Image (cartoon, grey):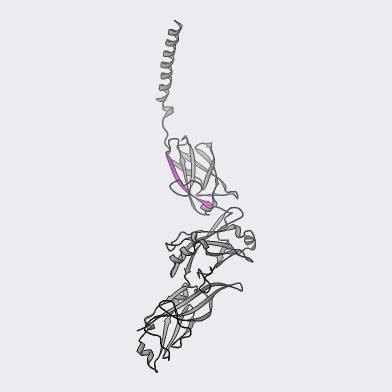
Amino acid sequence: MKIKQLAKSASFLLVAGFISFTIPSCSSEEEIIILQDVKVNSESFNLAEDGSTTIEVKVVPENTPIAKAVLSTSLFNESGVFEVTRLTPKGNGVWQIAAKVKDFSRIQNGQDVILSVYQEDNMYIQTTLKTNDPYSIEGKYTPVHPQAFTFYSAEDGKLMEIPFIITADNAADLAAISYDNIKVVNGTGSSTPSISITHFAIAPMTGKTGFYLQVDNAQLETVKKAITTIAFLDCRVMIIGPNGRVAYTPVRLIVSSPKCIIKDDQLSLLHTELSAPEFNRQITIDMTHDFYRLGKQNDKTTFEAFENRGLYNSQGEMADADPQFISLGYTTQGKNTTCNVTLKHDATIPAIGTYHMVERLKGYWEYDGKKYPTVCTDLQFQITIK
């Protein structure tokens, strides 16, 4: 009997519970509120030295329940740059969002940041703000460096390195960083597809704040196959300040093979011409492009040593250590360089075939009274005797 009464009581409670649950759900107090707008007092927000910030927003309607807020650097709510640490209702539709930068390498001063405000059902509205970072180090540092180098030496096959010297207008800013604060990362432009910064390594510089960039020795054979003439390396010098801020400087380098073959129709000769005792021909070859890719783009790079390496046949064998039928001289005016070639009769005339007259060229980049070797290449003038 008690059991039956308990059952009846339970049935009544279930019905009562159902009624008490369903009736309020139909009341106006539980209407679904849809977020219509998010207003901010300012178009930017300030970062404290530790990367923290506070943003106040006003939602419309004022009684809209807010579940979360996200700060991101893209429309796709990219995570990892900011962390929202607190979301506090202040009344009358005002919400206070506390956030902090987690990764300074992905946020710059003045960069657009997207604020997404969410309801419980993941419906959201976005608005765009700009960062204002008084502790930014952007523009404080300038890497000074050559524009090109040969990545290994034609003389001994050793790796060559290109110097990067970090400068700053304020001595205190320069004193605040060291080699440990410097990295080189991929650029945002376009390198030659077969190479990237992953094929290179950096080493510290003594006496100055900076570093040397060279091919990673483990990648040398790969780079040799990839660069038969020149390649463009697009990268960025990344400096990390003592407060965690990051500054990037884009860099585009010309990386040259030490083998520089120079072809010109004027270097095609008839064997009968060279055989004539009176033969003497003066020609001029424009070398501006060849010297440009070796770093002759400003007065800081100079070429000082031209060494005759002799005449080689098509098999790479020495044909004449000191050929007399050809002589070379160079003229530079501003950024333009020409090679003045004299071709004349000689008692010893090479046989019909293709040859390379080789001159070794060494170049230096000068900064603050010091010369840095950046070029050691063999200029190979291709001569065809028919």
Q: How many marks?
A: 0
Q: Position of residue 42 (x, y in %)?
A: 51, 48
For this orientation, the residue located farthest to the top is 1
Q: Position of residue 271 (x, y in %)?
A: 36, 87
Q: Position of residue 306 (x, y in %)?
A: 51, 80
Left or right of 200? Residue 7 is left
Specify the segment rendered in magenta: 121-140
Tell me which residue sits at (42%, 34%) in the image.
33
Q: In the picture shown, does residue 284 fall above or below 235? A: below
Q: In the picture shown, does residue 86 fall above or below 331? A: above
Quadrant of res 238: bottom right
Tell me which residue sits at (50%, 42%) in the image.
57
Q: Does 125 appear in magenta?
A: yes
Tell me which residue sits at (59%, 64%) in the image.
210
Q: Position of residue 84 (x, y in %)?
A: 53, 42
Q: Does 180 appear in magenta?
A: no
| Nearer to the camera, 370 or 197 | 197
Quadrant of res 14: top left
For this orientation, the residue located farthest to the bottom is 278
Q: Quadrant of the N terminus?
A: top left
Left or right of 125? Residue 104 is right
Q: In the picture shown, does residue 121 fall above or below 52? A: above
| Residue 15 visible, this orientation | yes
Q: Quadrant of the C terminus?
A: bottom left
